[in-house]
Each structure stands twice: as structure tokens, then as C-alpha cells.
Amino acid sequence: MTAALQLFATCAKGLEPLLFDELKQLGLSEVQQTIAGCRFQASLPEAYRVCLWSRLASRILLQLGQTEVGFKLESTTAAIAATPWHEHFTANESFVVDFTGQNQQIRHTQFGAQLVKDGVVDHFRAQGLERPSIDKAEPDIRIHAHLHHNILTWYLDLSGDALHRRGYRLAQGAAPVRETLAAAIAMRAGVDESTQLLVDPFCGSGTLLLEAAMIVLDHAPGLLRERWGFNAWLQHDDVTWHALVAEAQQRLTNAKAARSLKILGADNDPKVLAIADQNAQRLGFTDFCEWRAQDATQFTLPEELAGQTGLLLCNPPYGERLGEEVETLLLYRRFGQRLRTSFAGWQIAILAGDESLLKRLKLRSHKKYKLFNGALDVILALYDLNKEQIEFTKEQSSDLANRLKKNYQKLEKWAAKEGVSAWRVYDADLPEYNAAVDVYNDHLVIQEYAAPKDIPPAVAKERLWFLLDTLAEVLPFTAANMHLKVRQKQSGKSQYQRQQLRNITTVVHEYEAQFLVNLSDYLDTGLFLDHRWARRQLAKMSAGKNILNLFAYTCTASVHAALAGAKQVTSVDLSKTYLAWGEQNFQLNGLQPRQHPLVQADCLQWLQEQRPQQRFDVIFLDPPTFSNSKRMHDVLDIQRDHVMLLKLAARLLKDDGVILFSNNKRKFKLDEEGLAEAFLRAENWTERSISTDFARHKGIHHLFKVTHWHD
């Protein structure tokens, strides 16, 4: 086939310009860049050369036919059948059809593929030949059909398996980069035959480094592949192909002998380093490579490379899973500091999940490219550390660091003396850093409050990042044990929504009790720290008494009452999940839940259904500020409904009984007249209930002692 062939090289989105340049460099003159690939004309030897040498293409497709898809699909099948398929493969070869695109007549790719398959089979029958069989797993021939604007084009896939399957990577790490993307990163970073030192501190299974090394050492990306889409093609020229392979092998041999290259990869996972070494062995690059188990934020060059400069390229974690934000942000911040101090004069290429991560490096990039890592939008940023890198951020005040240190030193001692291992260390003490920070053993939970409307989102985010940076610097907690949650004003359906199950838990102690807290899966942890004093007060009232805990949540107040010797504690909550959690808390404290009923019910409805018998000595009532749960019988607004709720509860209270009524509505006003009409009186215990760690935030809750009015 000496005539010009019509071909299409597919590629991942974002790589089209690079692919265009690559095809030009391979000696092709008729190249047209389009979406997700490039069209080009080539002779058969040139088409083979693209298959063997393209680092960026996903597939090389040889166009065999084209037709307009009209109302009658029979004409489309006939046009496909008119292609001389028997000149391309025999009935002894299996085939498969890959179909993309749709229109009014062909709305499903499976239907489109069947249409093309029928045309191919019809052709063989018309020639009086046996029909070839279908093999979806390992076909001898792969046909690709694409429908665009009612034009159907069909191709023979010369690649077979996608071209990113080079043959050297038989295993990979947890978050691999496809070989074609790795090659694109290396190209954008400026890798060429003169590159002498390549470093990746997040190397994983080594793909970035090895693809860059293949460029330096003139290794054809298809050289190790044994199976191609053209192997069973009747017009395949085996002599021409093997001549090209031999030429590529000689070029590799010459380059390995002539070029000086050092590859240094590091990762904190020895298992993936072993995979990287195996991949390098398959490429014949072992002599050029050194693999080291080392954390990227502590990465240093070996002594023999001290003072040298080169190219550092890497693909750090993106932190796309919920709960990894803090660890990832701090990783980028510390990695940026490492680059600044240890890699002056170097060229840096970093593939990041988004712009916010790159900002944490505090480095100025001179070029950025939008790419795709699979389905993920990513950014490749290039940095020239030959240029002075001044931290492009306003000088932050030391007030925050000083406040955090002071609070921690004071409150850690207080908590130890008090006998609690869960406490608040910071609560928007400085208004611009609008978050609460809680200690749970050796974990920190950071709850970001919604920023005021007059604060731009970028400013609020920068302040949050600075808070996280400062927490990591001045408090003794690891990044992996810092958990970020966004807490906004609760309304409607936004209360207590679970985020994503990661099951990071710890057991904290609070006076005599122990509680299981979940640091990752809910907006709240299962323990309301500000109600600590109220729970202890309930315990002091509970010996030998019957206790009712309404809106019991995870039953922490119930556990305190039971540990203090309550005769019986009844816990009522609508959530099956929280009651099961409460049962765990009972068991954790050596208490038998069967002695203390756990009732799953709408508290309002449950109160209304109870007979007005005075049977509880103490009722602990801590309702949500607002609730319209789908399973609640009524909508609850604590400001509007608190008198009604207290009246219902008082029906079940002994004459000398006590209701401990609390809520977290910031501007709550007790309706004393409404209570008096219900023959109830309330004593405000709010001030005494604010623990030392919440003294800076006195409006966090309200607590009242409510009793029957006796003349």
C-alpha cells in the first residue's frame, strides 16, 4: 500500500496539540488537529512508524469507509457491506466492533455496533465465504466506527490494545498515571535527549520517570509490544514492520551507550518501589535508576548529586476523597517548602488535582496546562527555580500561632485535671479565622464556620489554609490526624447529614465515662462537647432514679446517668443509627443496654402517646434547634415550640422531678409567661454550664432547670 492512507490518531482530551506536534516531528505533512485526536495521511511505512513511535496517541485507526446515515438504516448496512472486508481479514479471524456517537436513528452504541457487525457479516456472505466470529476479549481484528453529525466512518484499528499499554508495566500503584499522560507531562516539562537528571519524590510505580527516560534514551514506546491490531491484517507488510523495529532497537542501543542519565525515584511505600524496579528492568533501564523509600517532604539528593540541577516531575496525591483535605493541603505546603530549600536552580513539573493545591506550594509557575487523568480534571504546572521564588502571600500575623499555643498549654492542663480527653482548644477566638478546633485524644477536628457574606470565598479559603498550616506547626498533631469539616448554619434538610464513610474512630473519656466518637463520617462526632457540664449534672441527680433522655442522640447523657446508679434510663431518638451507636456506648462502659430501654421514635409523637403518669424523676431534654426530618411527625422549631415540648415532657415528670432543658439556638428566649401558664418554672443554669474550654464562646448553648410550679 504505497498510496496515501487516511488515518486518525486518537488521544486523551488536552493532548491534541502535543499529538499534532509529535506527528509533524515523525515526518507527516498532512496533519489536521481535531477533538480527541488528529487526522493525517500517510504511507503504510509511515503509519507503522506512528504506531511504533507515538508516545501520546491512544489508537491509530485506518479509515476504510464512510457514509451518511439516513432514515433507512438498510442503506447504512449496505454501505458497510460494500467495503471489501475479505481483503482485510479472513473468516478464520475473529473481530469486534467498537462504536461511538449517536443520532436520531442510532441512539445506543450497542445498536450501532450491531449494525456495523451485520454489514461486515453480510459482505462475507455475499462473497460466498464463511462468516467470521466475534471475540470481545481478544479479537484478531478490531473495527472502530464513529458517528458524528449523521456521518458514519469506520476504521481498522492498527493498534489492537490501546497504545498506552507499552508492555513494561505489568503492575501498578494505587493511583497510576496512564503512560500517554506521563509522556505528555515529560514533553511539556521539556524532557529531551540532553536531559541528564530526573527526579520524582512521589514516584509510585515509576511511570513518570520511565516515560521521561524513554524520551531521553530514544526508546520507541511500542518496542516491547508483541501484539498489534495489524498482525492478522491481510495487507500487513511484515518485512517493512520488522525493519522499523530493528531500526528502533538500534537507536535505543546507540542512545543508551551515548547518553548520560540518572533517574532517582522516591516513595514512602516500599511495595510500589519494588514494582517500579521491575518496570525499569523490563525496559532495560536498571543501570540508570535508583529507588529510595523516603517521604517527599523530607526528600534530599544523595551526596554524589549535591550541587547538580535537573528536572523534578511528580504527581502528588490529589486528596479527592473526603476527609483527606487537611493531609493533602499540608503535604503540598511542606513539599513547597522542601522545593524552595533543596531544589534551587531546578525545573519542576507538578501534576495537581486543582489550583488550590498548587497555591499551597507558595511558588510561582511560569506555565500551566489543563489535562485529564482519566476522568479527573488536573493541572500541570511548570516552575523555574532558577528564578527567585518570593513567597507570594501577605505576611501573616503571629497572633493566631500565639493564641493557639496559649490556649493549648492552658487547656491541656485543665483537661487532664478535669478528667476529659475531648475538649475545645479554639473557637473563632480571632474573627478572621472562623472555625472551631476540638481535641479528641491525639486527633484534631476542625469545623469551619460559614464565612460572612462580605468575605470573598478566596479570602475565607486562604484564612482556613493558614489556620491549618498554623495548627500543624504549633500543635502536636500529625496531618493524618487532622480532620476538616464545614459547619454552616443549619436549616431544613442540612442537619446531621452523613458525608462519606471512612470510619475513623477513637474512644475518649469524660469523667467516669467512655464514648466512641467518629471523626470522619458525620458532621458531628457523636459527642457534643459543650454539654459536658449538663451531662455531669444529670449524673449527680441520677442515683436510684428513673431517667428519661429525649432526643438522646448517641446516649452519652444516658450513659452518665446509668454509671451514676440510675434505676433505669430510657433513651428516645428517631435515628436507628444513633441508637445503635448509643448501645455501643453502653457496652463500652460495661452497662447492659437491656436494663436501659432504647426507644426508636419521633420524640414529639412518643410524648403525645404516653399516658400522663408521673414516672420519671429527671428528664434530660436536648432537642435540635430546628428539625423537619422526613420521619418526624411534625416540624420542630425550638423557639416556637419549646413551651409545648416542656408541657408534654412535664406530664411524665414526678411532682418533685426536674427537667434539664438545653438547646443551641444562639438567640433563644425562654417564654416564661408560657411556662407559668403551664404551671412550670425555670431556673437559668446557662452561665454555670459553660465549661472552661467554652468560656470564650458563652452563647454556644442555653440550659435551664425546669420544675413544676408549687404554691
Image (cartoon, grey):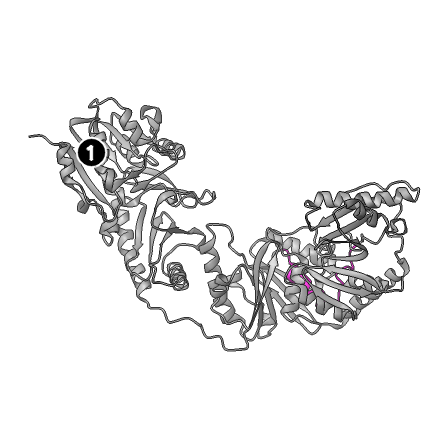
Residue tagged 1: 659
The residue under label 1 is which amino acid type?
Ile
Quarter holding the N terminus? bottom right
358 relative position to 486: left or right = right
Whether residue 221 appears in magenta in the rendering, the answer is yes
Q: Is residue 437 visible?
A: yes
- Which SS class for mark 1? strand
Front position in the image: 374 or 214: 374
224 relative position to 671: left or right = right
Front position in the image: 373 or 143: 143
Residue at (53, 56) in percent of width and height: 318
Residue 676: image location, x then y, percent = 12, 35
Instruction: Give above or below for 692 relative to 10.
Output: above
Instruction: Give above or below for 115 relative to 469.
Output: above
User: Which quadrant of the view contains residue 452?
Assistant: bottom left
Q: Is residue 256 visible?
A: no
Front position in the image: 424 or 643: 643
87 relative position to 118: left or right = right
Residue 279: image location, x then y, percent = 69, 56
Residue 79: image location, x then y, percent = 83, 50
Whether residue 699 appears in magenta in the rendering, the answer is no
Quarter holding the C terminus? top left
Mark 1 crowd level (few <14, some 14–19, many ≥20, 10 Å Cα): many
What range of the chain is rendered magenta? 205-225
Residue 163: image location, x then y, percent = 73, 56
434 relative position to 336: left or right = left
Q: How many marks?
A: 1
The extreme front residue here reads 71
